[in-house]
Image (cartoon, rainbow, N blue to C red):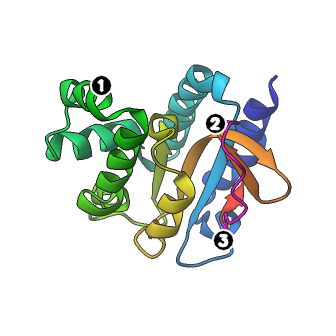
Amino acid sequence: MPDWKARLTQQLEPVLKQPDPRQQLSAYHDMPYAIFRYPPEEEFGVRRQVSLLRTRLEQLGKRVTVISLAECLCAALEAEGMGPAALIDAEKSVGLEVTVDTIFQILSEYQPLDELVARRIPSDADPLRDLVFIVRAGALFPMYRTSALLEQLKGKVQVPAVLFYPGELDGAAGLRFMGVLDAEHNYRPKIF
């Protein structure tokens, strides 16, 4: 069994099955979420296992909301008139770096990613019943780092949530997004 799969089923799943998993997910009451890291090349296997995990948790009476960061990214870009054709044209005319900076600005200022995520959490979410899975973080690479997203979600997420993070552990609390970018060491949520 791969290391990530063992961590998912033997470490994370037992926590999520608890009546109130918040304290074991995080030491911070205003950040009831954790990070589950996995090798980026295992994306499709992780998606399959997350789907199975959701089913098992729902069979226990949990309500699991899955929020795709890829869908949030598409919604933000479309809202700003930056559909796929516009992105291709922008890259051709101003280059990749300027296009990446523009997308970051959209997700930071015009269509803040944290707000897009928070709006997808059910309004009647109950911390004793609901769980949120934030998936497809790799879609943000290289435009937006998830460390910014987690800090901005502070106080906006009241139910247990897990960010499924494609990257590598660097030290005790550092993560390298997609295994490529320099490690961020300011992650406060628990890393599984």
- From the top left corner, tell me how far across and down residue 43 is, in percent: 59, 25
- From the top left corner, tell me how far across and down residue 77 is, in percent: 24, 42
Q: Classify residue 96 as left or right of residue 71.
A: right
Q: Residues within 10 Å of mark 1 (few under 14, many from 20)?
A: few
Compute the Cα span from label 3 to label 2: 28 Å
Helix, strand or loop status at disc 3: helix
Q: Amino acid at mark 2?
A: Met
Compute the Cα span from label 1 to label 2: 25 Å
Q: Which residue is mark 3?
A: 23
Any part of residue 87 in sight: yes
> Residue at left 66%, top 22%?
41
If you read the primary sequence from the N terminus, does the residue marked by circle 3 or circle 2 appear first? 3
- From the top left corner, tell me how far across and down residue 159 is, in percent: 46, 65
Q: Amino acid at mark 1?
A: Lys
If you read the primary sequence from the N terminus, does the residue marked by circle 1 or circle 2 appear first? 1
Which stretch did the figure color magenta? 179-188
Any part of residue 192 in sight: no
Q: Which residue is mark 2?
A: 178
Q: Residues within 10 Å of mark 3 (few under 14, many from 20)?
A: few
In the foreground, 1 or 116: 116
> Residue at left 82%, top 22%?
1
In the foreground, 90 or 3: 90
Q: Which residue is mark 1?
A: 92
> Residue at left 48%, top 72%?
154
